Amino acid sequence: MGDRSTIEWTEATWNPTTGCDRISPGCDNCYALTLSRRLKAMGVAKYQADGDPRTSGPGFALTLHPDTLAIPRQWKTPRMVFVNSMSDLFHAKVPLDFVQQVFHVIADTPQHTYQLLTKRARRLRRLAGRLDWPPNLWMGVSVENADHLDRIDDLRQVPASVRFLSCEPLLGPLTGLRLDGVGWVIAGGESGPQHRPVQEEWLVEIRDACNEADVPFFFKQWGGRTPKSGGRELAGITWDQMPPRLHVAAAQ
């Protein structure tokens, strides 16, 4: 995990924390949990602490990695950086001062654009006023079905330059979706041997809502046994829309 990523909507990953706990249906087949088991077996140091088997698993205990905070400073070429692809920065076990340190690194490396995603929208909202929000940080929440539309209400109260939704894995229709205050939407199906199929009408409804609200729409995948099983076209089109990035020189 680091300098390059195969995730379609980013270019690099940076994991100042690793590990997490399941909190909603979108976590049931978590790719990061599956990957952590493999990394633990390979002896990767960051994935040796086991989480609670009821909510987490081998190699997936929430763990802070202060030694990784300097990594983005070493990247001189500007890039899009997904923060915590293997964790959730707003997990209850991540202290506020560590979240603040992560935000400081983001602010101090304005040549990069950072994408931070959480399912813990309530804690995000509660901490937002105690964080300094740099303009090169995009903040998102995961919304896998209509039961979690309330996460968007929390997100709207966060002063991020771009607020976005990750509707992946999409597990049901997002009936009642409103996009006021939202600047980007990612949608996609689940992948893996136990994937739950996504329905085309759910995706079309989200795409149409984005078009009506003039919000960039990114269709990541249909999913299936592998992420690329179903391809990336929706109604014959590859949807790769994204908000514009800031172009700022590196801090001297």
Image (cartoon, rainbow, N blue to C red):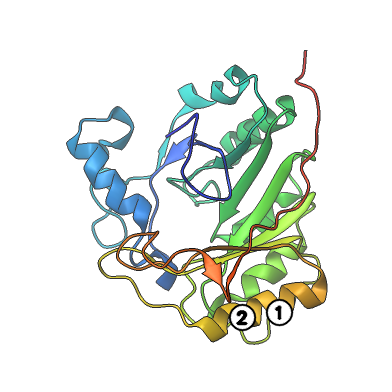
Q: Nearer the viewer, residue 61 or 82?
A: 82
Residue at the spot of label 2: 204
Q: Is residue 90 above or below residue 42?
A: below
**Crowd around label 2: few <14 · some 14–19 · many ≥20 (10 Å):** some
Residue 18: give x, y in percent of width and height.
41, 41
Provide the secondary structure element on which disc 1 rests.
helix
| Residue depicted at x 50% and y 52% | 92
Q: Looking at this rendering, what residue extends furthest in the top direction?
A: 252
Tell me how far mark 2 sits from mark 1, CA to CA: 6 Å
Q: Is residue 24 visible?
A: no
Q: Is residue 27 left or right of residue 58?
A: right
Q: Nearer the viewer, residue 89 or 34?
A: 34
- Badge 2 amino acid: Val
In the rendering, which numbered label is found on residue 208? 1
Q: Residue at x 27, y 54 (%)?
A: 52
Quarter of the figure that contains the N terminus: top left
Residue at the left extreme? Answer: 41
Q: Is residue 121 left or right of residue 30?
A: right
Residue situated in front as seen by the camera: 102 or 194: 194
- Asked if marks 2 and 1 touch (Cβ < 8 Å), the reply is yes
Can residue 144 be seen here? The reply is yes
Which amino acid type is marked by label 1?
Asp
Whether residue 238 is situated above or below residue 138 in the rendered picture: below
